[in-house]
Image: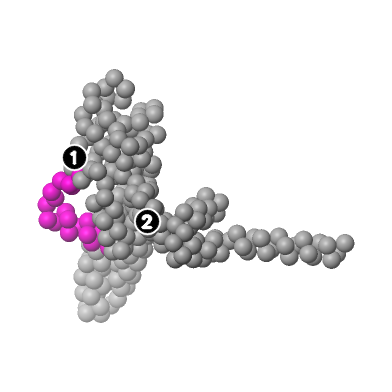
Amino acid sequence: MRNSCFIFFCFISFVASALSPNSLFKDANQAYQKGDFQKSITLYEQIVRDHGVTSAELHYNLGNAYYRLGDYPSAVLNYERALKENPSDREVLANLQITRNKLEDKIEPMPELFYISWFKAIRDAFSTDVWAWLFIFSLIGSAALWIVFVQSNKSRNKKAGFYGGLLSFVLSILLFVTAFSSWESSYKTQRAVVFAGSISVKSAPVISGNGLFIIHAGATVSITDELGEWVRIRLVDGKEGWVILGDLEVI
């Protein structure tokens, strides 16, 4: 009986090990390298579905596999999810642009003031978590310098504590603004990819609403409002309207 239990335990441990996220990820990578892109997709998706694991690398690999099969909307979706994890990944950004060139819609973003573009470039250089930790460290540093200013009896130390604490506090404010903007861009603003072949964007959340324009599979949109099964979307070129949520896949 003990031997049977031991064998059963070893079998369960072996199966669990074989189905672990790391093992599945390795098998998916091997399938991709062999050109079996459908198998690699199945394994990557199993990691997400069964283990709840997501990462920039996982979604980047999924995007590449979907691209190889010509499923450009799914490729865009996974590249966007990879960027949500790591906004500054140049390879993902490059592959996303290549994939967008394959889409029917060529949507050009509205021009921005140069300082807004600079701010976004700096913000997207790091993840929200990194900006948040930088803010915390800067705030702690500011508090420490103010303590030096208050407690020190030496003029030089008091001056260094005052000006250092002031500069550090200003830096903390800038870091907080950057962290909040990064969080708002990545998590508060809900974005989605169109998966229906083509959608007539309506002026109102009803089927009988006037059609404003047409968008096709693979287009990325921002969701600005919801009403039942309908959502209001905005494109990067500023166009807005209503579509059915079921035609989209949220990033």
Q: Position of residue 241 (x, y in %)?
A: 25, 31
Q: Secondary structure at mark 1?
A: loop
Name the image quarter holding the N terminus. bottom right
Q: Residue at x 29, y 33 (%)?
A: 199
Magenta span of residues: 107-126
Q: Residue at x 21, y 29 (%)?
A: 212
- Which residue matches tag 2? 68
Q: Position of residue 92 (x, y in %)?
A: 32, 60
Nearest to viewer (mark 2 / mark 1)? 2
Instruction: Count residues near mark 1 (Cα–Cα under 10 Å), then give few for <14, some for 14-19, many for 20+.
Output: few
Q: Position of residue 63 (x, y in %)?
A: 38, 55
Circle 2: residue type: Arg
- Which residue matches tag 1? 238
Q: Residue at x 23, y 23 (%)?
A: 210
Viewer-proximal residue, 142 or 183?
A: 183
Q: Residue at x 69, y 63 (%)?
A: 13
